Image (cartoon, coloured by chain):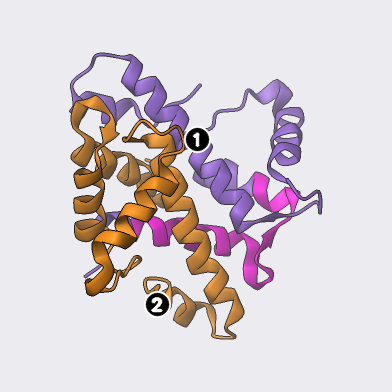
Chain colours: A purple, B orange
């Protein structure tokens, strides 16, 4: 039996493939769909400057400049967003249970 | 409702905290326990050189040299291991369903 952690890791891989298909890379529109559909509790982008913010994010992630996001670039986003959540939680003095509840929300 | 991806990200945070406690950092023994208990389908270390390999891994991850692994250093391990799994899968020509089955196993 895989552990919960391993299931979490496989989920990240599966979601990436759901949007990238077999080519294994996300075009900008696919990354936008993925963020909007699967990460809207973690990444909240204000509606009025949504496109601009997502353009900047895409450029930051696309480290090799090929206008596509490969899995290594995508996992950098996951690492960045989860690190941010943990950093915010450690700054608060809530009990662990409550910290985990607020881990979803990054303004 | 959080998405499966978000649940996966929260799981990574929770498992880290389960082993780090409120101090938010893993000592070497805690990282070893986490890997042995939670990642044994993803990271398989041969028994006869187990300690040596884990020592090397710990030194690689501990980028600031404080002899503890913070969450940012831990998520680097998660990124490395999942990237490796994806890289291996993309090299094979299996259908997606079968690829996902073998995503657990990294020798």
For the residues bearing labels 1 and 2, Cβ distance under 8 angstroms? no
Q: Label 1 to label 2, Cα distance in Å? A: 27 Å
> Are dots 1 and 2 on a single chain?
no
Which residue corresponds to the image point at 81% horizontal and 48% vertical from the top-left? Answer: A65
**Chain under numbered label 2:** B
Residue A3 in view of the camera: no
On the image, the x and y values in percent for residue B62 come to 40, 40
Q: Which quadrant of the figure contains the C terminus of chain B? A: bottom left
Q: Secondary structure at mark 1?
A: helix
| In this picture, residue A71 sits left or right of residue B68 | right
On the image, the x and y values in percent for residue A8 come to 36, 55
- Seen from the viewer's position, the closer of residues A39 and A87 is A87
Q: Which quadrant of the figure contains the N terminus of chain B? A: top left
Which residue corresponds to the image point at 57% horizontal and 64% vertical from the top-left? Answer: A17
Packing grade of label 2 (10 A; few <14, some 14-19, many >=20) is few
**Chain under numbered label 1:** A
Which residues fall within the magenta stretch?
Answer: A7-32
- Residue A10 forms part of the magenta stretch: yes
On the image, the x and y values in percent for residue A63 come to 73, 45
A41, above or below A1, in the image? above
**Tag 1 residue:** A81
Q: Secondary structure at mark 2?
A: helix
Total number of numbered labels?
2
On the image, the x and y values in percent for residue A100 come to 27, 31
**Tag 2 residue:** B101
- Seen from the viewer's position, the closer of residues A30 and B21 is B21
- Seen from the viewer's position, the closer of residues B16 and A100 is B16
Residue B95 in view of the camera: yes
Packing grade of label 1 (10 A; few <14, some 14-19, many >=20) is some
- Seen from the viewer's position, the closer of residues B23 and A91 is B23
Predominant SS of the magenta segment = helix
Residue B72: image quadrant is top left
């Amino acid at each position: 039996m895989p552990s919960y952690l391993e299931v979490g890791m496989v989920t990240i891989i599966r979601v990436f493939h759901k949007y990238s298909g077999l080519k294994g890379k996300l075009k900008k529109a696919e990354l936008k769909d993925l963020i909007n559909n699967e990460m809207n509790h973690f990444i909240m982008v204000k509606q009025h400057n949504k496109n601009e913010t997502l353009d900047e994010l895409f450029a930051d992630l696309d480290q090799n400049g090929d206008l596509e996001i490969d899995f290594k670039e995508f996992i950098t986003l996951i690492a960045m967003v989860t690190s941010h959540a943990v950093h915010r939680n450690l700054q608060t003095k809530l009990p662990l249970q409550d910290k985990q509840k607020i881990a979803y929300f990054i303004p």
